[in-house]
Image (cartoon, grey):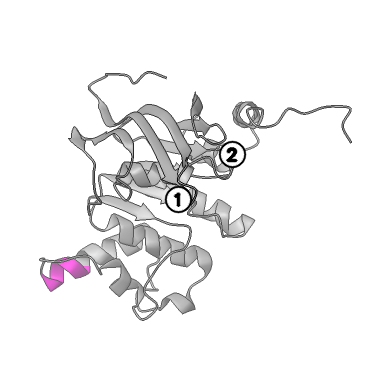
């Protein structure tokens, strides 16, 4: 798939290959010739089977893994290392257990006054819906609340891009749906560009402007699906179900005679 050279592209991934070395000195090909671009403010979801390189791709784009072939550009600058202007949210919240919510959210804020720090931290706590839990410790939070705190911590430095690696994968079904709704509201209010890895096709259709469908290893882009649905998405609508079905069919072919 060719990269669009449209000047509005904010992220460009071009010719990205990734290999892992094995004990027998042979290299395992993980990502194969990945090419795509992202516009500022877009939400992109990456779906594919386990082991196809989704998380590896995310780490390469955000700068956590620079050992790859090809180029990653964000706002015209080549990405070779992590930066505070690129936020990351993992499947586990990774909060410091000895710090309160407000201390965790403000942990990376440096070189600003106490008043500015307090105001900024409170803004993002309010944004993710944790007002009233500022003094709570991670052990006192539910899984969904802890992930909200993790998202607030990732947003507090106003990252140009927020990367999310299966952020709701460990949550129960009801909490997951609640968090998907919350993330959609947060993105709308902050207008942050987001790239999210997920195994959940329904989640991808609900959240994304476009969905990158990956093949099995070595991971290649099989298809990029534009989700041409309104912001308020009905999971039971015909249009929603048809998009979900088309992506599902990339991985499974149903046999009506199979029991």
Q: Position of residue 77 (x, y in %)?
A: 18, 36
| Residue found farthest to the front | 24
Q: Is residue 195 above or below residue 152?
A: above
- Asked whether the viewer can see residue 227, the reply is no
Q: In the rendered image, which quarter contains the N terminus?
A: top left
N-terminal of the pair, mark 1 or mark 2, is 1
Q: Is residue 132 magenta?
A: no
Q: What residue is shown at x 40% (from left), y 74% (from top)?
A: 133
Secondary structure under badge 1? strand
Q: Is residue 251 left or right of residue 93?
A: right
The boundaries of the magenta stretch are 113-118
Residue under circle 1? 165
Q: Position of residue 182 (x, y in %)?
A: 46, 52
Q: Is residue 128 above or below residue 186?
A: below
Q: In the rendered image, which quarter contains the C terminus?
A: top right
- Asked whether the viewer can see residue 93, the reply is yes
Q: What residue is shown at x 39% (from left), y 44% (from top)?
A: 58
Q: Is residue 29 left or right of residue 5?
A: right
């Amino acid at each position: 798939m060719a990269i669009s050279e449209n000047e509005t592209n904010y992220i460009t991934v071009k010719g990205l290959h990734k290999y892992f070395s094995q004990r027998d000195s042979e290299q395992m090909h993980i990502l194969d010739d990945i090419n795509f671009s992202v516009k500022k403010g877009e939400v992109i979801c990456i779906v594919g089977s386990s082991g196809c390189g989704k998380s590896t791709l995310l780490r390469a784009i955000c700068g956590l893994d620079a050992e790859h072939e090809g180029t990653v550009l964000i706002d015209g600058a080549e990405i070779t290392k992590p930066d505070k202007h690129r936020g990351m949210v993992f499947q586990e919240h990774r909060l410091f257990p000895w710090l309160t919510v407000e201390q965790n959210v403000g942990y990376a804020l440096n070189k600003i006054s106490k008043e500015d720090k307090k105001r900024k931290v409170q803004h993002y706590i309010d944004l993710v819906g944790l007002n009233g839990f500022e003094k709570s410790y991670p052990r006192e939070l539910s899984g969904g609340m802890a992930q909200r705190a993790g998202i607030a911590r990732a947003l507090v430095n106003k990252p140009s891009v927020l990367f999310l690696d299966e952020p709701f994968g460990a949550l129960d079904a009801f909490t997951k749906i609640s968090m998907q709704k919350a993330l959609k509201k947060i993105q709308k209010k902050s207008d942050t560009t987001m790239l999210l890895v997920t195994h959940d096709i329904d989640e991808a259709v609900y959240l994304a402007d476009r969905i990158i469908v990956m093949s099995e290893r070595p991971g290649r882009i099989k298809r990029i699906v534009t989700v041409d649905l309104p912001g308020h998405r009905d999971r039971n609508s015909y249009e929603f179900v048809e998009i979900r079905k088309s992506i599902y069919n990339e991985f499974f072919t149903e046999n009506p005679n199979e029991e």
